[in-house]
Amino acid sequence: MIKAVMFDMGGTLEDLYSDEKNDRATGEALFRILQDHGIEVPFQDAKSLWAAVSPQVLAYKKESERTMMELKPEQIWADWGFRGIPVDREKLMACSEEIAHMWETTYYDRRLREHGAEMLAGLKELGLHVAVVSNTASLFQVFDTLEKYGVRQYFDEITLSSIVGYRKPHPNIFRIALHQAGCLPEEAVFVGDTLSRDVVGPRKLGFGRIIKINSFLTPQKDIGKFDVAPDYEVTDIYDVYTILKDELGR
């Protein structure tokens, strides 16, 4: 019996996109944050600052995907992003969550998928526990974004890698979400946009159903071969509701 539905955030509940414009805007926003907090750096403009910081942040992302562990924003930006750059470490750590939040919302253009709100309302009408399980470098961005979309009320729990320290597909981030939901793996459904994160992890734990929807990130993250497959693939997020309504009605 299905009791809970868990969603990835970026690429699943949200459509997202990034290009050179986003990359440039992220560097400019970082430069402004440092100026606002009186943090001096040995760079005269945003472009030169971001040219030094960006590769180090991307190196952290690559390492975190390898280890499946997430650091706190203070560690990401002080120990990775500004590694080797003379900067007031105490001031930088104090605004690291602001930087992390900015990065998540500037490096990507984000919007709630069409029919997302209707789908979530339908799941709650079915009496299901609804949750988010997301990899993110920010402590609060997911909460704030769900509020912005006007759908925060539909979620019973939100499990973030930045808070629990484990990144999908590490089994512990899913185990934590299952404990919060008070259900067994076979009683849960996971909905995501990548085989490498959102199908591999739940499949190993024995989730009852896995639903996949493609996104801008899918081809970037699903490089190589994976010996797993979702139970369903959808193109409209609303189909999650219709699939589960049908399954619960059997």
Image: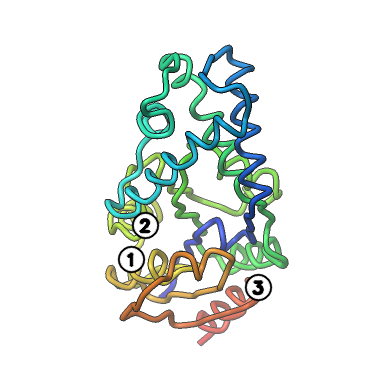
Say which of 11 and 117 sits in front. 11
SS category of the residue bearing label 3: loop
What residue is shown with label 3?
238
Which callout, 3 or 2, points at the residue further toward the start of the chain?
A: 2
Q: Which mark is residue 79?
A: none
What residue is shown with label 1?
201
Q: Are marks 1 and 2 in contact (CB under 8 Å)?
A: yes
What residue is shown with label 2?
168
Q: Estimate the x, y position of residue 94 in percent, counting from the top left.
A: 48, 19
Name the residue rendered at 43%, 70% in the picture. Answer: 222
Which callout, 1 or 2, points at the residue further toward the start of the chain?
A: 2
Name the residue rendered at 55%, 22% in the picture. Answer: 43
Q: Estimate the x, y position of residue 210 in percent, counting from the top left.
A: 43, 75
Where 20 falls versus 50 (above or below)? below
Label 1, label 3: how far apart the Cα atoms are? 23 Å
**In the displayed structure, does residue 78 sit left or right of residue 118?**
left
SS category of the residue bearing label 1: helix
